[in-house]
Amino acid sequence: MTDIITVALSKLDADPRNVRKTYSADGIEALAANIRADGYRLLQNLVVRKGDKKGRYFVVAGGRRLAALKLLADAGEIAKDYPVECKEREGEIATEISLAENVMREEIHPG
């Protein structure tokens, strides 16, 4: 299942199954600046699965984007319940999605 849903930012949580566990503060601030510059829109949807509590979702892929959005919300630039477009996936494949997103990407060629 892959459905596009809209979820309030305040209902999104980092997924404990996400293979990436740390982010640099500078990287999150730079990503927040990029989101700000594009009118507070994400270029790529978050990928989520249903959370443990009703109405909550775990972010399977897009933890850095989630952190950047929360930084913008904490700064008062967007609402805490800012609507975020997400792709909903089944929970059983959460780790595989997270791993694929982090392993399969390729760095930009410097030339």
Image: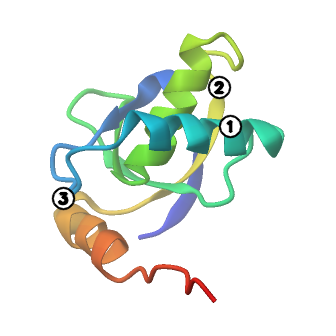
Q: Quadrant of residue 61?
A: bottom left
Residue drawn at point x = 38 percent, y = 46 percent: 63
- Front: mark 1 or 2: 1
Quarter of the image with the N terminus in it: bottom left
Q: Is residue 71 above or below residue 92?
A: above
> Residue 100: where, in percent of width, then height?
30, 77
Residue type (three-letter) at the residue carrying disc 2: Tyr
Query: Farthest residue toward the front?
Result: 111
Q: Please indicate, yes or no, whether residue 7 appears anywhere in the rendered image.
A: no
Please identify the quarter of the rendering in which residue 29 is found.
top right
Tell me which numbered mark, 3 or 1, is placed earlier along the sequence: 3
Residue 33 disc label:
1
Is 6 in front, or is 40?
40
- For badge 1, the amino acid type reads Ala
Vertical position of residue 111 compared to residue 59: above or below: below
Mark 3 vs mark 2, foreground winner is 3
Q: Nearer the viewer, residue 94 or 104?
A: 104
Residue at (22, 54) in percent of width and height: 18
**Residue at image point 23% right, 58% down:** 91
Q: Earlier in the sequence, mark 3 or mark 2?
A: 3
- Depth-wise, is mark 3 or mark 1 nearer the camera? 1
Q: Which mark is residue 82?
A: 2
Q: Position of residue 58 (x, y in %)?
A: 32, 42
Q: Is residue 9 above or below residue 24?
A: above
